[in-house]
């Protein structure tokens, strides 16, 4: 499959099945079967019978990667400045399916807290401050579907494991335009998060401050919101 994609990538024009199978060293029927699967997934287009070229799905995925990289680039310096002010870990997270993924962190050993979620680590949406931002931006039916799929399993006694409680929390997030995690993922750790938006006004990431539960300072919130807005503006977002 990867070989066929590489062969199609070597030419701008559509290629015939015979040419593709010859270059791949595959029997035509085998190449045809694999190409059909790629067409179904929109990774390959069939502009006319027996001719193939790369499909739009690859462009869509490429744009997702581009957005992820550009968000990280835009966020790094503002994250370091926010960490300098708060002296607590500052995290950049993005949604992937039913989880958030930690893609960058600004922290120092002096913060006095061991954060176990490493870069590349994952956590359920409903247990994290950034995850709640993403859920709050979903339609009600999507939130119910998420609850059904995941079962809203909890990690601590504070975890929101019932849909009515989660929906009430998400309504609060929409009103306040920020989200919190009150020891719902890890006991002893609280977080606050603000959204990062792209040039289309779409929520693409979340910026969060983690701190020992007793040390999370509400006074950090305006600076957190301003930092998230600064990163959003780097991505072309215009606040109304």
Image: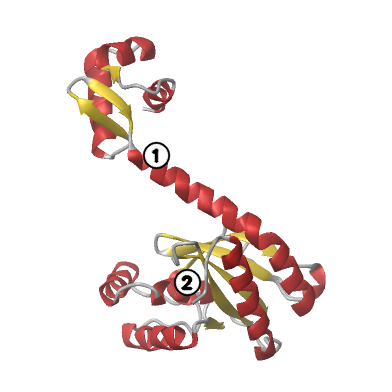
Give the residue displayed 28% in from the left and 24% down from the top.
52
Q: Is residue 4 left or right of residue 124?
A: left
- Rounded to the nearest angstrom, the CA distance separating label 1 from label 2 is 27 Å
Report crowding for label 2: few under 14, some 14 to 19, many 20 or more residues within 10 A (C-alpha).
many
In the rendered image, the vertical position of residue 44 relative to residue 82, given as above or below: above
In the rendered image, the vertical position of residue 88 relative to residue 79, given as above or below: below
Q: Residue furthest left?
A: 49
Where residue 206 appears, as percent x and y from the top left, is 54, 69
In the rendered image, the vertical position of residue 104 relative to residue 63, given as above or below: below
Where residue 113 appears, as percent x and y from the top left, is 73, 75
The kind of secondary structure element at disc 2 is helix
Q: Is residue 192 visible?
A: yes
Q: How is the image coloured?
A: secondary structure
Q: Is residue 100 left or right of residue 54?
A: right
Choose top left, top right, bottom left or bottom right for residue 73: bottom right
Q: Is residue 186 visible?
A: no
**Which mark is nearer the camera, 1 or 2?**
1
Give the residue displayed 31% in from the left and 11% down from the top.
19
Where residue 45 appears, as percent x and y from the top left, is 27, 32
Where residue 123 appears, as percent x and y from the top left, is 50, 66
Give the mark nearest the N terminus, 1 or 2: 1
Choose top left, top right, bottom left or bottom right for residue 56: top left
Choose top left, top right, bottom left or bottom right for residue 6: top left
Q: Residue furthest right?
A: 110
Q: Which mark is residue 152?
A: none
Tell which of 217 and 69 is nearer to you. Answer: 69
Q: Which residue is mark 2?
A: 131
Name the quadrant of the N terminus: top left
In the rendered image, the vertical position of residue 101 relative to residue 40, given as above or below: below
Q: Which residue is mark 1?
A: 58
The kind of secondary structure element at disc 1 is helix
Give the residue displayed 35% in from the left and 21% down from the top.
13
């Amino acid at each position: 499959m990867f070989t066929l994609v590489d062969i199609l990538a070597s030419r701008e024009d559509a290629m015939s099945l015979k040419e593709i199978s010859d270059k791949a060293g595959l029997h035509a029927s085998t190449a045809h079967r694999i190409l059909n699967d790629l067409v179904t997934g929109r990774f390959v287009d069939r502009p006319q019978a027996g001719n193939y070229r790369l499909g739009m799905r690859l462009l869509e995925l490429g744009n997702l990667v581009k957005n992820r990289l550009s968000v990280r680039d835009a966020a790094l310096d503002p994250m370091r400045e926010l960490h300098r002010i708060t002296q607590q870990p500052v995290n950049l997270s993005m949604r992937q399916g039913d989880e958030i993924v930690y893609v960058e962190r600004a922290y120092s050993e002096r913060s006095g807290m061991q954060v176990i979620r490493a870069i590349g680590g994952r956590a359920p949406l409903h247990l994290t401050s950034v995850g709640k931002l993403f859920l709050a931006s979903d339609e009600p039916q999507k939130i119910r579907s998420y609850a059904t799929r995941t079962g809203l399993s909890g990690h601590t006694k504070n975890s929101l494991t019932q849909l009515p409680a989660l929906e009430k929390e998400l309504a609060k997030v929409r009103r306040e335009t920020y989200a919190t995690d009150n020891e719902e993922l890890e006991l002893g750790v609280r977080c606050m998060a603000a959204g990062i938006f792209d040039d289309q006004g779409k929520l693409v990431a979340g910026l969060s401050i983690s701190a020992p539960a007793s040390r999370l300072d509400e006074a950090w919130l305006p600076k957190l919101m301003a930092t998230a807005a600064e990163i959003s503006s780097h991505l072309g977002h215009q606040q109304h």
